[in-house]
Image (cartoon, coloured by chain):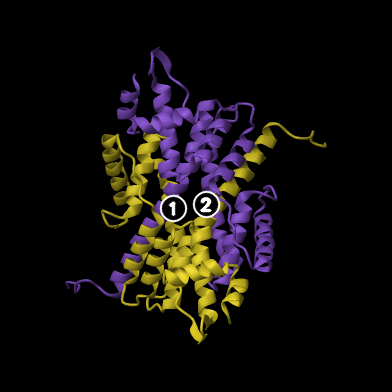
Chain colours: A yellow, B purple
Amino acid sequence: MRISDLSRQSGVPVATIKYYLRERLLRPGTPTARNQAEYDASHLQRLRLIRAFTNIGQLDLSSVRELIEATEDEDLPLPKLYEVVNRALFPGHHVPGDPDGLARAWLEVTNFIDGLGWRVELDAPGRDTLAHVRAALVRLGCESEMEFFTPFAAAAERLAVLELSLVPTESTVADRAAAVVRTVLFEVALAALRRLAHEHYLTQREELTYPLAPAVA
Amino acid sequence: MRISDLSRQSGVPVATIKYYLRERLLRPGTPTARNQAEYDASHLQRLRLIRAFTNIGQLDLSSVRELIEATEDEDLPLPKLYEVVNRALFPGHHVPGDPDGLARAWLEVTNFIDGLGWRVELDAPGRDTLAHVRAALVRLGCESEMEFFTPFAAAAERLAVLELSLVPTESTVADRAAAVVRTVLFEVALAALRRLAHEHYLTQREELTYPLAPAVA
């Protein structure tokens, strides 16, 4: 197909496709004439992948590039692939000041992770993020017990095991791409479901407290 | 305290504090001399709140302003407060093209939410986000069954009920602020925990498949 068809089918403007081509996020098409090239289903799939990462996963293009390169590098072991995903997804937190609070939070988080029996790298971005969350909650006086994270960890564990069961040990590039897509998109889905659950249960509770209409006997 | 102390204690540069003052995200201090004002613990707390939202929650300042205003508006019912939070947290997805796929996904998501027994607004941002995730998964050929969301919904439900149990029905501004902070920060924490669980279980699995060292008999 021509670039205009690729644009129509993917919903990505031609100018953006040309930008992705220049940035080598998209492989060049097969030249058919001066200033004209033929694209195929693999280009369409790649565009959909880029758009899912940028529009839904809110990733920037350099993270998208890193993710795609890691996905296609079949020599990269799966745990390393997930490390790349984690780095791409955590933007890094710059909270100057309060280094004491952060150091304390980091230790609490590390004890908590050890208590779960999870073995993760000391510099895993998730550990750092959790320490920042913990430090902020303490600073803001919102939550005093580290144990409040326990049900969140239990939920995360169940879901992670389920997701990984879909990733074969001997994975193809397609398997790896699907694993990365799920990691990015299910995070967004989980957040959306949690907010929907908030809305439902809160509305239900308020109606019980202040019934909208008198109950019919 | 003076603005320099406020800066030191919060870790926020003086220039940024002045910017927040101009933008009315921070209440002015009490004037003590020309070009000098006195700040108190409430200013420090507000700065910490802004930083938690921007640095950890990755929100922009206009969303932060909306959140703070809604939190302090005691006439706003709790469900409305959560609606404001949800709007602030979902950046809105612009996926042009494939409107059919999106419309189909929206119906599937709506059936799924109905099946859970959740009553949420038709225009709830979470519903829209979930439809975009679903449409992207289908487009990318990653997941064919809507049922895969079920354990995610179950986890979201458990956590939401737990979180809401911390929010009193007769809530003060402080209760409401804590509820908003938790909603933003626990989302980040949950994502971090899920990634850590991925890392742990994946490493464990790879070691079982390819032992790092021969087992000692």
Residue name at image x 55 percent, y 39 percent: B164
Q: Which mark is residue A75?
A: none
**Camera-side residue of B144 and A150:** B144
Q: Kindly identify which residue carries mark 1.
A: B191
**Camera-side residue of A24 and A137:** A24
Q: Is residue A164 left or right of residue B166?
A: left
Outermost residue toward the top in this view: B32
**Camera-side residue of A208 and B70:** B70
**Alpha-carbon span between mark 2 and mark 1:** 8 Å
Identify whether B93 is placed above or below A170: above
Find residue A100 and report its image quarter.
Answer: top left
Residue A69 x %, y %: 37, 71
Residue name at image x 60 percent, y 49 percent: A196
Outermost residue toward the front in this view: A34
The answer to the question of whether label 2 and label 1 lie on touching residues, with beta carbons closer than 8 A, is yes
Residue A65 x %, y %: 40, 66
Chain letter for mark 2: A
Chain letter for mark 1: B
Residue B193 x %, y %: 40, 52
Q: Residues within 10 Å of mark 1 (few under 14, many from 20)?
A: many
Find residue A61 and report its image quarter.
Answer: bottom left
Identify whether A116 is placed above or below A178: above
Of the residues shown, which amino acid type is indicated by label 2?
Answer: Ala
Q: Kindly identify which residue carries mark 2.
A: A191
In the structure shown, which secondary structural element does the residue marked by tag 2 occupy?
helix
Q: Is residue A23 visible?
A: yes
Quarter of the image that includes the N terminus of chain B: top left
Q: Is residue A25 visible?
A: no
Residue B149 x %, y %: 56, 61
Residue name at image x 59 percent, y 48 percent: A197
Of the residues shown, which amino acid type is indicated by label 1?
Answer: Ala
